[in-house]
Structures are given as structure tokens and as C-alpha cells.
Image (tube, grey):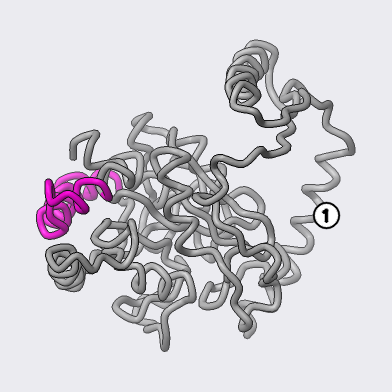
Amino acid sequence: MTEKALSVARIADGLRSGEVSAMQLTTDYLSAIAQQNPRLNAFIRVQGDVALQQAAAADQRHRQGKALSPLDGVPVALKDNIDYTAAAVTNGVGALRDRQAKSNAEVTRRLLDAGAVILGKLNMDEAALGATTNNPHFGACANPRVPGDTPGGSSGGSGAAVAAGLCAAALGSDTLGSVRIPAAYCGVTGLLGSRGQVSRSGLSHLSVSLDQIGVLAQSSVDAALVFDVIRGYDQTDEQSWPAADFALAESRDSAFRIATIDCAPFCDGADAQEINAAVGSVAGALAARGHQVSGPLKPVGDFTALRRAALLVIEAEGSVACAG
């Protein structure tokens, strides 16, 4: 795939102008998956025929001037713990290879209602418990940026697929870093909204208290375009919060309060200096645009103890989810 094809924003512009078609894009992505996935193992299930049908419908809407959203015709993919009736939902568990979703997850429904083309389901750690995407049933997923390395987890398939250009964007789930870790390892953007912004209805839970659904994409602009489609109140999710229902795209020209954190407590000296310098550069650019930026702040609290407590919650709630 070309760099142009990897950008959700550029794809949306091309579809809107008629420069590209959803059918050609989808065919190109399916070809890239066929060529690269045997090595990467990012996709564990490809829904080519269904995706091409969705692409044809998107092209017809664009020709008629009736595009459903900026994502109409944009090829995306789903982590395999998010329900999609066109494919099995395994949650990374071998015994669930043939489990069919009874209905679409709320985020899947929103993507389909926006006209997105769903290419298939992505590899993950078993039951979303892990940080390497070395799945014992579906095989290990490889990092396309750094051969031989892990893409991170548990949404490693999502990070790898976006980084390799096998989809324009992907959804993943995050309990204790599982969107943010693959984004960092694979060199893409991971966006995890505040609790309650994105419905988790139709997500196979690891921890009902901590699980959230997020976006992996090539850039913050791309991630925001997808996030604006999937976010919103859902009365079927007990964590969903109407007051959290705001659009990132509509807020880009507004001033935000932004804080940065000193990463020195979490990194070696040289790495910390490099990361802090990069964060400082971004903070300066944001301040120049009128945003209120403070920091870098020193982390407060014992993060090792916090992580240990979170893992206890995950183990307790995960055992209940498995028993159910």
C-alpha cells in the first residue's frame, strides 16, 4: 500500500472527490493482506467477500452524493474480541473458533452505519490477557516495524495491521495498556478516550471495570476521525456517560488544558531525555496554537503498587468472565 492509502483522512478526501474508489482500495488492502499476513499473522480472519460488498455499496453512495460519513468506504478492521455478525468472535481463545456473534457490538454498528468497510478480525493475546500477542491458538503476531520483535499486546494484531498498511485503522481494547502498548511498539497512534465515551457493548470482557475500546491509526487526525464515529452514549453499557459524548473533530479549534509528565521514573536516562524532548516539542507546538500546557509534572504515587492492584482486579473479574 502507498503512504496515501494508509491515511484515513486522505482516503476520505479521495473517496469524496472520486479520485479513488472503495472497491479499488478494498481490493488493494486484501491483496496486501494476502501478501504480508502469512509473515505478520495480524489477521486471523479475513472477510473479503463481505468487505467487497460493503465497498461496492459505499461507491454507489459516493456516486449519488449520499456518503454516510467521512469513513464511508474506508477499510478498517476489528480486534477479535469485538462482536461482528459477519465473522466468528474468538476473544483469542481456540475453543471459540466457531463462536458466532448474535449481534454487532455497538462500535461495530456505528462503523457500519458510517459506511466503513470491515476487512476482518485481528490477532490478540488469549482472552486479552497479555502484552505480546503471542497467541497459543492462532500463533504469534510479528512487529512489521522491527522484525523479530513483538508488536505488543493485547491488541497487537491491530497495531501490526495499521503499521503494515493492511487496514487504514483498527479498533482494539485496553484494560491496562492494550491499545497504548501496541501503538508505541508499532509506531502508530493509539487513542483511548475517557471512561464512558465509547460503548463496550458487544466486547468480550477481561475486566468489566477497566476495559475500554480504543482506536489505532497512522496519525492523531486519523484516530480522531474514527473516534468521532464510535464514541457516543449507549444505554446498554453501564459505564456509558451522556456528558462524555463530545466530538473530537468539532473541538480541534478549541483550547484544551494539557499536562505532560516527566517519564524519567519509567525509563533509562538516555531514553528519558529523548522522550521528554519529543514530548516537550509537541507541548510547545500545542501552546503555540493557544492550548494551556503545563508540566512536565512529576508522577505521584507508587505505580508498581497501582499496577499490582489493577492486576488483582483483572484476575478476579477475568475469572468471573471465563466462568460465565
Furthest-right residue in this view? 301
Residue 152: percent from left, percent from top = 50, 43
Determine the residue positioned at 40% across, 83% down. 101
* Residue 236 is at least partly visible in this image: yes
Residue 99: percent from left, percent from top = 39, 82
Determine the residue positioned at 27% across, 50% down. 12
Determine the residue positioned at 72% across, 25% down. 263
User: In the picture shown, does residue 258 fall above or below 249?
Assistant: above
Most common SS among magenta residues:
helix
Residue 317: percent from left, percent from top = 72, 71
Image quadrant occupied by the N terminus = top left
Give the left or right position of residue 221, taking residue 234 as reference. left
**Which residue is the site of mark 1?**
309
Residue 55: percent from left, percent from top = 17, 65
Q: Is residue 104 magenta?
A: no
* Residue 48 is at least partly visible in this image: no
Image quadrant occupied by the C terminus = bottom right
Residue extent of the magenta highlight: 12-40
Total residue callouts: 1
Give 14 or 203, whichever is nearer the viewer.
14
Give the left or right position of residue 143, taking residue 61 as reference. right
Give 323 or 287, whichever is nearer the viewer.
287
Determine the residue positioned at 64% across, 57% down. 175
Classify residue 110 by image quadrant.
Answer: bottom left
